[in-house]
Image (cartoon, rainbow, N blue to C red):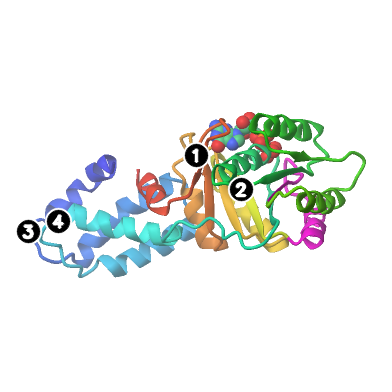
Amino acid sequence: MFEDLEAKLANALKKIKGQALITEQDALEVLKNIKFALLEADVNYKVVKEIEQELKEKLVGKQIEKNLTPFQTIVDTVHKELTQVLGAESSTFVINSKPFIVMLVGIQGSGKTTTCAKLARLLKSKGRQALLVACDIYRPAAVKQLQTLGKQLDIPVFSKENTKPQDIALESLEYAKSNGRDIVIIDTAGRLQIDEQLMQELVVMKNTVQPNEILLVVDSMIGQEAVNIAKKFNDDIGISGLIFTKMDADARGGALLSIKRIVGKPIKFIGVGEKISDLEQFYPDRIASRILG
Ligand code: GDP
């Protein structure tokens, strides 16, 4: 970890060796490289500028700790800053009502349907009784996909033909109550792009079922566009958190940093593969390391 950054910082750090404090000039030279690393990781430019400024304030005049090298002192400061921007600590959700209702929203292809099943599996492994609800009725394959996944997991899937999505969701709550399911996970429709009709439908669904959590599923491979999508969903519907999928691919994860800063909602889980078990709780410190390369 950090070898690449270390090489880039080598020159800047040579000058700092032997000093007790980091001067402004040293900090600027180091920050040039940090800025480059963040841009390379696809962090939004405005966010990079903000973080650069915050880091400058933290680094200039900083004492180089006795048992650390200048490199370690700087990397430690940068790592702490990124971790803090990403959310300081890991958060999932507090299950405080029965049934607890989770609605997953997002663009088509982001991994919503797969993630519904992954989440149901994860909760099952913690002793919860999930119910999957197929409300992505415009993509018939999505209903089938969810049913197949449910069967594989031995988790029931609620679906209904010729019914509006919000009515399917509402009926599923009754089903959950009478069948002892304590978590309802609703798969909603997506589109290839954001459109106003979809947003309106999601707002109707939200008002009808009043979910405890609305989680936006985002494909980490789409880079900077993720910020626009998250902002739009949050402005129109109001999300409570995010799940980033396809983190097993080679995206460095700059979008996570940008979204957390710009939209301000917590990242709760990350998808790390196509298998149903490939969903992990989000740990900000791990992603901070990954963004630094
Ligand atoms: P939806 O249209 O949003 O419901 O998307 P799907 O759930 O159908 O997923 C679209 C594709 O992304 C499928 O081929 C999934 O297997 C794949 N996918 C979902 N999550 C992940 C992930 O975390 N990693 C990888 N590699 N693929 C994923």
Sequence-wise first label, 1 or 4 = 4
What's under tag 2, amino acid-wise? Arg
Question: Which dot marks residue 18?
Answer: 3
Determine which residue is flagged by label 1.
247
Q: Amino acid at mark 4?
A: Leu
Q: Position of 237 compared to 22: left or right?
A: right
Q: Which residue is mark 4?
A: 68
Crowding at mark 1 (Cα within 10 Å: few <14, some 14-19, many 20+): some
Callout 2: few (<14), some (14-19), or many (20+) C-alpha neighbours within 10 Å? Answer: some
Identify the residue under disc 2.
Answer: 128
Disc 2 vs disc 4: which is toward the camera?
2
Q: Position of residue 135 (x, y in %)?
A: 79, 44
The answer to whether the residue bearing label 1 lies less than 8 angstroms from the nearest atom of ligand 1 is yes
First to last magenta residue range: 183-210
Q: Going from the N terminus, do you reach mark 2 or mark 4 first? A: 4
Query: Which mark's residue is nearer the viewer, 1 or 2?
Result: 2
How far apart marks 3 and 1 lie (CA) works out to: 40 Å
Q: Position of residue 78 (x, y in %)?
A: 31, 57
Q: Is residue 253 left or right of residue 112?
A: left
Local packing at callout 4 (Cα closer than 10 Å; few below 14, some 14-19, many 20+) is: few
